[in-house]
Every structure is written in structure tokens, then in C-alpha cells.
Amino acid sequence: MDTKDNSQQEAEVERLLRFANLHRIRKEWLQAEDYIRKALVWSPDNPDVHEMLGDMLRELGKPHEALEEYKTAREIAPGNAALETKYATIILEVSEAEHAKAVALDVLSNPQKLGAKPKNAFLALTFSALIPGWGQIYNGEMKKGAILFGLFLLTVILFVISIPHSVTPMGFIALLNTSPIMSVFLMMWFMITLYAIIDAPLVAAKKSKRPESNDRIASS
């Protein structure tokens, strides 16, 4: 491309950007974007065009798209202090938006976390050791806690009912060794209690952790 063509290209790009900026001031976003993209056709490697497009996309609330335009402008013309500032700022905005999105999704998936206080694993274990299901209720798992407590209570009732009225304390020990039904009820009580005292502190520790965003913005 000769000097004349270069001058014509520069003049046309300047004209298009001038009109684009005028429409931006008037908040006429569609027209402004149309002029900027026409300028890109004329000069796809012009960092000023990509920067202006990034500015407009940022104003329109499209930080991810703006980030790409700023990144392209930086690659074409590295070392521009003003552009570097815009690039760093948009990365921060996108990072904060991603974190907020992750927290929101976590709350939507686990609505019980909204406003929930951190749980103490030791207290959860102690409650479950005393009465299976209480640790789960302490953690806010009302349904699970009620089921465990109900199973525990049912097991105790069935175990007591299965004891003969005339049995003596010494005979009770012997009965445990000879009665399969009582052994089953005793094993059920043990398994329910064991599950409750293992599950409650683990869930309490998990609920105490703050939700974190695992997504990171790609490095420059």
C-alpha cells in the first residue's frame, strides 16, 4: 500500500472514529458500534480502534468482550500506560463479577447457607453422641436429623419391648448373647449412632468454609 493509500486509510479511520465518538456521547450505542466496526474493517490492526471498542463495550456492561478488545490493543501496541490501566481495571472488574457469580450460584444451590453462621464441629459431634440426629439438626439439616433421631428412637423402643419382663440383670447379659433379635436392634442402634457422630462434624466443618470461586481470569 503506497503513501496515498495509507493517508486515505488513516483519514477514513479518523472520520469513522469521530462519528463513533459523537454517537457514544449521545448514547446512540448501535450507531457508535457500527462506525467502530467499520473502522476495524479499514484498519484491523489499529490499537486505537480496538481500545475505543473496548471502552464502549465496557460502558454497555460487557466486561468480557471489552477485556478481549483491550487485550488485542495491548498486543498490537504494548507499553501504552493508559491502555495498561484500562486493561488492569477491567481484569479486576471481571474477577469480582466472577467471584460474585460463584457465590450467588453457591447460595442458589445451597439456600440454607444464606445468613448461616459457622458451625462448630466439636459441638456437632457432642450433640450426635448424646442423641443421634441432634448434631444434624444443629447443622441445619432438619430432615436428616429427624430421620436419624426417629430411627434411633424406634430402635430403642423395639429393643426395650423385646426384653422379657422377668429377666434379671445377670440374665439380661446372657440374653444379649443368645437373642438374635436383641442383637440386631443393638447393632442398628450402634450403626445409627456411629453414622451420626461421623457425619455431623464433617458437615459442620464443611459449612464453616467460605465459598470460593475456582475460576480465574486468564493471565495476560
Image: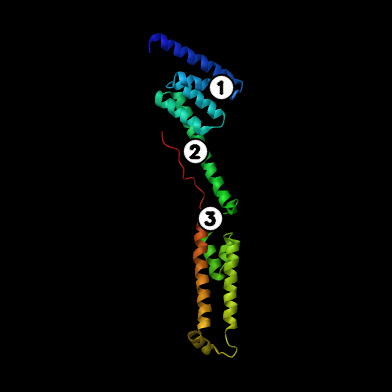
Quarter of image, res 127: bottom right
Residue flagged by tag 1: what amino acid is it? Ala
Nearest the eye: 30 or 59 = 30
**Residue found at the far top of this picture:** 4
Q: Where does the image place residue 190, in percent across and percent down from the top left?
A: 50, 74
Residue flagged by tag 3: what amino acid is it? Lys
Q: Where does the image place residue 117, in percent across and percent down from the top left?
A: 58, 54
For the rendered model, the colour scheme is: rainbow
Local crowd at mark 2 within 10 Å, few (<14), some, or many (≥20)? some
Image position of 43 (left or right of 21): left
Local crowd at mark 3 within 10 Å, few (<14), some, or many (≥20)? many
The mark closer to the camera, 3 or 1, is 1
Q: Which residue is mark 3?
A: 207
Q: CA distance from mark 3 to mark 1?
A: 49 Å
Whichever of labels 2 and 3 marks the residue nearer the N terminus, that label is 2
Q: Residue at x 52, y 63 (%)?
A: 200
Q: Which residue is mark 1?
A: 32
Is the Cβ of the residue at disc 2 closer than 8 Å to that at disc 1? Answer: no
Is the Cβ of the residue at disc 2 closer than 8 Å to that at disc 3? Answer: no
Q: Residue at x 58, y 79 (%)?
A: 158
The mark closer to the camera, 2 or 1, is 1
Kind of element beneath mark 1? helix
Q: Where does the image place residue 83, in percent across and percent down from the top left?
A: 46, 25
Q: Which residue is mark 2?
A: 95
Is the Cβ of the residue at disc 3 closer than 8 Å to that at disc 1? Answer: no
Q: CA distance from mark 2 to mark 1?
A: 27 Å
Whichever of labels 2 and 1 marks the residue nearer the N terminus, that label is 1
Nearest the eye: 117 or 180 = 180
Q: In this orientation, does residue 89 appear?
A: no
Q: Residue at x 57, y 22 (%)?
A: 31
Residue 205 vertical position relative to residue 56 in the rendered view, above or below: below
